[in-house]
Amino acid sequence: MDLAEWYAAGRWVGLLDLIDMLPAACRLNEAIANDPEAAEAIAAMPQLEEEWAPRTSEFDLHAKILREIVHELKQNRQATIAAAGGKPPAESPFPAPRTEIDKAIERAERTWTQDFIQQFGFDATDI
């Protein structure tokens, strides 16, 4: 594959698809992060409503194991602080990838909850 030929032929969609498939830890993303113009444009973008989560394609077994280790270390820290008589800070686990499957499960659980509480005379605003 010759990217210069793609550029000369105007295969912009193919080039953009190829760029989107690059891993997060690539030299292109490093160059974009260190480019003053790109940094200004990214800083001017509105904040996302959803919390950041890693991409599913980059969340392999190693990332999952490291996530679990960090979570266990945070729990150990909380237990140590509590054992010493202090009040441990609230710790949140490192985010995992969020897929459409996760969102569908959340919607199904919410629907089930709404149906269940309606049996007792409550509505969805009471959740």
Image (tube, rainbow, N blue to C red):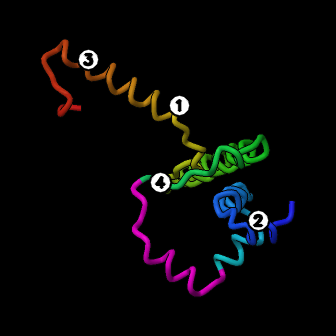
Q: Which residue is mark 1?
A: 101
On screen, residue 45 versus residue 98, left or right, reads left
Q: Which residue lies under the disc numbered 2?
A: 6
Pinpoint residue 26: horizontal percent, then vertical percent: 76, 66
Q: Which element type, helix, strand or loop, lies under badge 2?
A: helix
Q: Give amino acid for label 1.
A: Ile
Q: Secondary structure at mark 1?
A: helix
Check whether the beta carbons of the residues at disc 3 and disc 1 lie within 8 A of each other: no
Residue topped by disc 3: 115
Give the labeled residue for mark 4: 51
- The crowd level at tag 3 (other Cα within 10 Å; few <14, some 14-19, many 20+) is some
Neighbour tally class for label 1: few under 14, some 14-19, many 20 plus, Cα within 10 Å: few
- Residue drawn at x 65%, y 76% is 32
Q: Is residue 85 above or below residue 3?
A: above
* C-alpha gap between disc 1 and disc 4: 17 Å
Question: Left of 71 or right of it: where is 65?
Answer: right
Crowd tier of the residue under label 4, counting other residues whose Cα lies within 10 Å: few below 14, some 14–19, many 20 or above: few
Q: Which amino acid, by three-letter code, is at mark 2?
A: Trp
Residue 13 image offset from top left, x and y in percent: 64, 58
Spatial CA span between label 4 and label 2: 36 Å
Disc on the earlier residue, 4 or 2: 2
Of badges 2 and 3, nearer the viewer stands 2
Give the alpha-carbon distance from disc 3 to disc 4, as whole Å.
28 Å
Label 2: few (<14), some (14–19) or many (≥20) C-alpha neighbours in 10 Å: some
Sequence-earlier tag: 3 or 1 = 1
What residue lies at 74% left-to-right and 64% top-to-bottom?
25
Query: Mark 4 or mark 2: which is in front?
Result: 2
Q: Is residue 39 magenta?
A: yes
Q: Say which amino acid is labelled 4.
A: Glu
Q: Which residues are magenta?
A: 34-49
Q: Which of the two labelled residues, at mark 1 and mark 2, occupies the earlier sequence position? A: 2
